[in-house]
Image (cartoon, rainbow, N blue to C red):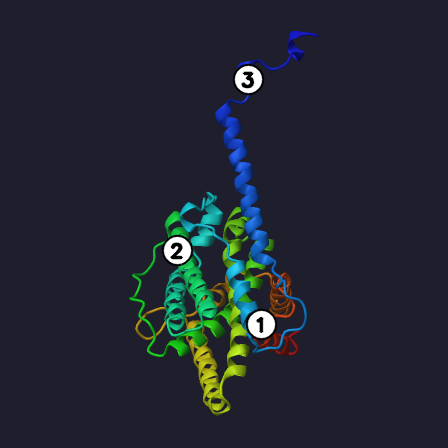
Amino acid sequence: MSDALAAPSRSEEPSAEARATAVAATIAKAAIDQADHAMRNWTDPEPGPVRIGSPQHLRMFCNMLLQTHNPYKPAVIDWPSLDPDALHRVTSLPIWDIAVQTEGRASIRVQSFANTVAEPLLRSALEMDGAEEARHKVVLSKLVEAYGIALAPEPEYLPPADAEWGWLVTGYSECIDSFAAFGLFAAARRSGFFPAELVETFEPVIQEEGRHILFFVNWAAWYRRNLPWWRRPLYALKVMRVWAFLIWERVGIARGIDADGVAKDANFPMNSTAAIAETLSAREMIDLCLAENERRMAGYDPRLLRPEIVPKLARLARRFLR
C-alpha cells in the first residue's frame, strides 16, 4: 500500500480535547431536542373523560404548564450573525420597544395575580407563567443588544390595582396576539424575512406563548365553573370590559403612538404584519394563522380546551374576504 493511502498519523487524529468537545456538543443537542419535544407534547397519564371545572381539570392544565417548561437560558443564547440585508430587516421593524415593554408588564401582572391565589398547584403554575413572561423580556432584551437596536427608556412596571383585571388583560391579549404571531412567524420563516438561524433561535418563545394561552383558556373555563352563581354576572361584565379595552388598545396601536408620543402597550404582531407578510393576502394570512394555531396546539392532551374566540372571529372575517 502506498504512503498516500496509509492510515492518518497520530498527529492528524482528533485530540482528546476535540473529541470531548464533540461528545459534549452531541449531548447538549440531545438535551435541547428532548426539552423541545417535551415542551410541545404532553398527555395526562390519568385516562378517561375530564369534566371542565373539576379538580382533575385543574390538575391537568396546571401540570401541562409545569411539566412542559423548557429550561433554556436567555443569557447563553448564541445569537447568529446576520448579513447586512437581514440585519436591516430585523432592526427596522417598529416593534421592539413595544415587545420588551409588553413582556415586562405581562410578567408583573401574572405574578401579581399569582400572589392572590391560595391553591398551591395553581399558584405554582401561575408563578411559572410569570417567570416565563419575564424570561421572554430577557430574550428580547438580549436580541436588541446583540443587534444594536436602540430602545426607548423603559417605564416602571407597576402591579395593577386589580390583580384579576391585570391577569385577564394579559391572558386575553395573548390569545389575540399569539394567534397572529403564529402566522407571522411562519410567514417570516417561509419568506426568508428572518434568517433560518434566527427563526430557530426564537422558536421556543413562540411555542411558549401557545402553552400560555392553552393554560389561560382552561383556567378561565375552570374559574367560571367554580364561581358562585351570584358572582358570575359581574365576572362576565368584567370580561366584556377587558375585551372592550383590548379593542380600544389595538385601535391605538394601529394609529401608531398616543398623544404623548409613547408606544401603546400591545404585543408586536400587529405592527409587523405589513412588513413580514407583504406577499400574502389577508385571506391567506388568516389561513396560515389558523393552520399554525392548530399545529402548535396538536401535541397537547385533547381533553384540554383550545382557544376558540379568536379563531372563530378569524374564520368569520375570512368569509368576507376574497
Q: Which residue is drawn at 52% across and 82% down?
A: 226
Q: Is residue 120 left or right of residue 57?
A: left
In the figure, 35 relative to 60: above or below? Answer: above
> Which residue matches tag 3?
12
At x 42% / y 65%, what residue is drawn?
A: 127
**CA–CA distance between discs 2 and 1?**
34 Å
Mark 3 → mark 2, Cα distance in angstroms: 43 Å
Mark 3 near mark 2, Cβ–Cβ under 8 Å?
no
User: What number is the disc on residue 138?
Assistant: 2
Question: Can residue 243 be seen by looking at this rendering?
Answer: yes
Front residue (pair 84, 238): 238
Amino acid beneath label 3: Glu
Query: Residue flagged by tag 1: what amino acid is it?
Result: Gln
Q: Give the number of the mark in front: 1 or 3.
A: 1
- Labels 1 and 3: the sequence-earlier one: 3
Along the line of sight, which residue is nearer the eye, 99 or 62? 62
Q: Which of marks 2 and 1 is in front?
A: 1
In the image, residue 9 above or below residue 213: above
Check disc 1 and report the residue beneath it: 56
- Looking at the rendered structure, the secondary structure element under dot 1 is helix
Point out residue 158 in the picture as x, y percentages from the top left corner.
31, 70
Disc 1 crowd, CA 10 A, few/some/many (<14, 14-19, 20+) = some
Q: Please state the horizontal and vertical placement of residue 104, each as a whole percent of the image.
A: 37, 64
The quarter of the picture where the C terminus appears is bottom right
